[in-house]
Image: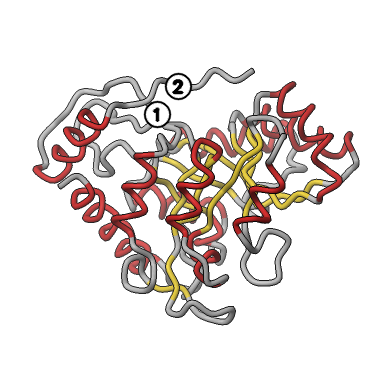
Amino acid sequence: MVNKPISIPRRQFLAASTTLATGAMMAGMPGRVLATEGEDPYGGFPLGIQSYSLRNYDVQQAVRHIQGMGLRRVEMYEAHFSTSSSPEQIAALLELLEGADISLVAHGVNEFTADHEANRKQFEFARNAGFKTMTANPLAESFDSLDKLCEEYQVRIAIHNHGPDSRYDKLMDVTSAIKGRHQLIGACVDTGHVLRSNEDPIKWLYELGDRVYGGHVKDVASKESRTRTVVVGTGHLDLVAMFQALREIDFPADGALSMEYEDNPENPIDDIEQCLAASRAAIATAAE
């Protein structure tokens, strides 16, 4: 069984977001969408970044940029932090993040198969690195294994949709996969890939509800298979509605909500900062 955090009442959420809009300070309160003590630029939402956004930088450079953007959470991808890392390498990465005041909240996107012991190694990696959510692209035959490992390790599997012709292209692909499975098997809703599949990411959030454990916040220029990433809110993603939905489904305070910007990999910093500014504005608007 999973101990679910207390949900934050709507009235308290609106107070937190109003604080964001006015720039006042606010003490933290218990809840899933949780404001920390002091001024919180994201109104209590645990917004971080997928390090794939910074894939052209080595891990030290990526962490420096994340720190410079004022983010406190990161979801690492394999090239920055390998699932085959030794204990010494894990310790070194965690020390690097601690020095930058950044928490490792997730890792992915990772594959899972019917090989139970191979799957276990990834759960061991999660335990040793201290994060609770693995963004995943599991094979259908992996779920019996994942049921057992989620219960044993109390680590979430967040199924990642990857757009047209992928294993989890449509909403029904994800809902069918998690039906009857361990409560810790849920979804990482990649809003950009949902749009590429010509579906509605807001509908995904509401229908998946308390099984949404992660999100890749991404916007696209067109609702087509082949398109490009744009600054969030300037394409087809209703950013305000997304944050309203995340609040209403009680997105976990320790979930992995990651900004992901895929274009301009040589110099994405300005674009990512525009995405973060748009997110702050959307959170304030969502409270009005």
- According to the picture, the residue beneath numbered tag 1 turns out to be 32
* Residue at 81% over, 32% down: 120
Q: Would you call the spot at circle 1 few (<14 residues within 10 Å), some (14-19), or many (20 or more)?
A: many
Check residue 8 in the rendering and tell me which mark sits there, or answer none: none
Residue 191 horizontal side relative to residue 166, left or right:
left
**Residue 286: horizontal and vertical position, in percent?**
23, 49
**Residue 82: horizontal and vertical position, in percent?**
70, 47
Say which amino acid is labelled 2: Pro
**Residue 235: horizontal and vertical position, in percent?**
37, 74
Secondary element at image label 1: loop
* Residue at 58% over, 32% down: 131
- According to the picture, the residue beneath numbered tag 2 turns out to be 5
**Residue 98: horizontal and vertical position, in percent?**
47, 33
Residue 112, compared with residue 172, is above or below; it is above
Q: Nearer the viewer, residue 39 or 144?
A: 144
* Residue at 32% over, 55% down: 241
Quadrant location of the N terminus in the rendered image: top right
